[in-house]
Amino acid sequence: MDLRISVSRCSRRPAACLLAALVVAPHARGQPARNDLAPIAIVGTREPAPVERLVGDVVVIDAERIRASSADSIEDLLRRAGGMQLSRNGGPGQNAAVLMRGTAASGTLVLVDGVRVGSATLGQFDFSMLNLADIERIEVLRGPASSLYGADALGGVILIVTKQGRGAWRFGAHALAGELQSSAVDASVAGSQGPLDLAASVAREASHGVSALRPNDAFGAFNPDRDGYVRTSASVRGGYALAPGQRIGVSALASRINAQFDSVEFPAPSFMPDASGDFRNHGETRLAALDYRGTVTPTWTTSARLSTQTDDLESGAREVSRFVTRRQQATWQNAWTPWAGQQIVGALEHLDESVDGTPFAGTLTRRTSAALLGYDGGWQQWHVQADARHDDNSVYGGVTTGKLGIGYDLRPGLTLRVLGGTAFRAPSFNDLFFPGFGVPTVTSERSHSIEAGVRWRTDDASLGATVYRNRINDLIVFEPDRTFCPPDPAYDFGCARNVARARIRGATLDGTWTRGRFDVHAAIDFLDAHDADTGERLPRRAAHQESVDAHWSRGDWKTGIAVLNVGARPDAGAQLGSYALVDLQAFWRFAPRWQAEAKLTNAFDRRYEPLRDYNAPGRQAWIGVRYESDGVR
């Protein structure tokens, strides 16, 4: 296949990328995809479904791909899958977020085992709180998803699934050591016996790191000390089959991070800036869930979940601020399959959120009740997906969203699709209530998007191309003009306001190829994201990003190379240069249950700024070993 498509042409005219893919795919050789080999995803419809049947743009990152990746974190792994860019305050362990399809970090909804996670004060999830070793698979729905999942899914949804117990009992352990006094260790056990299934894992990562900031930063916060981190985590997930088709399950995860960073304080009595303090983020994420899933009739399945999630952050040096988010959620969902290949999903949800924090006078709360109805199915060559949802919130009111998608099989394994939908982002507690900034009348951000795509798949290869446009209105931004803020003197320096608009368009091409000893994953992104009023590019969005991850195996040996190229992007009044990173890997299975590993990340020691004035680690060499037991019944 020849996929040489001009970057400049695709950035100006994304439809050219889709047209090129349409021309290429029908001429690629290979047998049509078989349904039994298609990956299964939940995120696209809220019920398990073959990815090839879905009209939405869904990506599945399985356990094998996670284990073989040279990525330094979950967020680094995600950006290599296409359609996502990384925003991180330095290297691993620093505050991290994912920008999906050009939306802000607050426009990506993150679920862990179906439970909404993140800070309700900031309105986003910090990926530095999770350890990649706890994860079995990741499902990504790129595109509008509020009609399935509610608030904050402007750009899409990331569903993170922790390890699960199935089949024979297995034990695994893994240890890595690297430069900058870095280390990573983890252990897990998983399996099932009769009606019982169980999986548990523990993990710890640490690094002395590098200085988070570069010298001469804009705010004078540079401190030459190393800004390292320690992250520990544990997860458990299990279930009991009460009867065939009836299972009750429990899951829990706890993760804690102690990360240093550079900042500045203004201590009394001089109130002069002081960057010498030992600034640290002490963060903790905890979640627990009780769930039930049962088959009522051969065509009707019901499920229910009760969950709780806590996000607790203490941040600072001599003066420490604390922010605590607590969520309790209840969900009841039913799936009805009246005919083969046709499914109707209905769900009711209730979410209670509360926030405590240093700036707030007391506990702040809000409640959301929601109902949704969805359909997915098809006839012969046609695939249809439609869903609608209404969210009613005690603070920002009611919001109704919807989505409609249609797919058509040009031939077996080759599908055209088009989809349009609406989505919204709820104002965060900071947007509404932070003293001297939040305004209670701030409303939700609203988006309208449309996309068109083509998917081609055979037994050993796949190729997808999607072009999209997204209009976001009522963006919540900082308003410096005092006349638009409440009369309270606390707002003399500005406030939150719904005033901005964004226009985003782009294209994503991604593909995989597995044959013999070779395994390749690749993605290309083009993005034009700008302020609709000023015409300026939105910050931290690169106009293009490319990634390739390739592995070659022979006998007991496996080698790999990963290349990531990120284009220039604006940030805080500066233009950050483009950069390319190359990682090298080698694996050697020296005994039936043992594997030695080595990797060289950022092999050419590329120096770059992930964000303005922030540092990233240079070249790092790692060596490690992995043990995996045989299954035991």
Image (tube, rainbow, N blue to C red):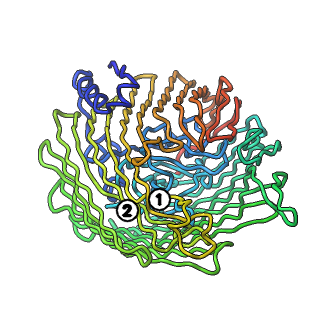
* Circle on res. 280: none
Labels 2 and 1 touching (C-beta < 8 A): yes
Give how far across and how far down residue 374 sits, in percent. Answer: 25, 62
Q: Is residue 59 above or below residue 199?
A: above
Q: Is residue 523 above or below residue 183?
A: above
For the point 83% across and 62% down, the residue is: 271
Residue depth check, mark 2 versus mark 1: number of the one nearer the observer: 2
Residue at far right of view: 269
Q: Amino acid at mark 1?
A: Leu
Observer able to see residue 334: no
Per the model, the C-alpha gap separating discs 2 and 1 is: 10 Å
For the point 50% across and 29% down, the residue is: 549
For the point 43% across and 38% down, the residue is: 82
Q: Label 1 belongs to which residue?
A: 111
Give how far across and how far down residue 184 sits, in percent. Answer: 69, 44
Q: Label 2 belongs to which residue?
A: 149
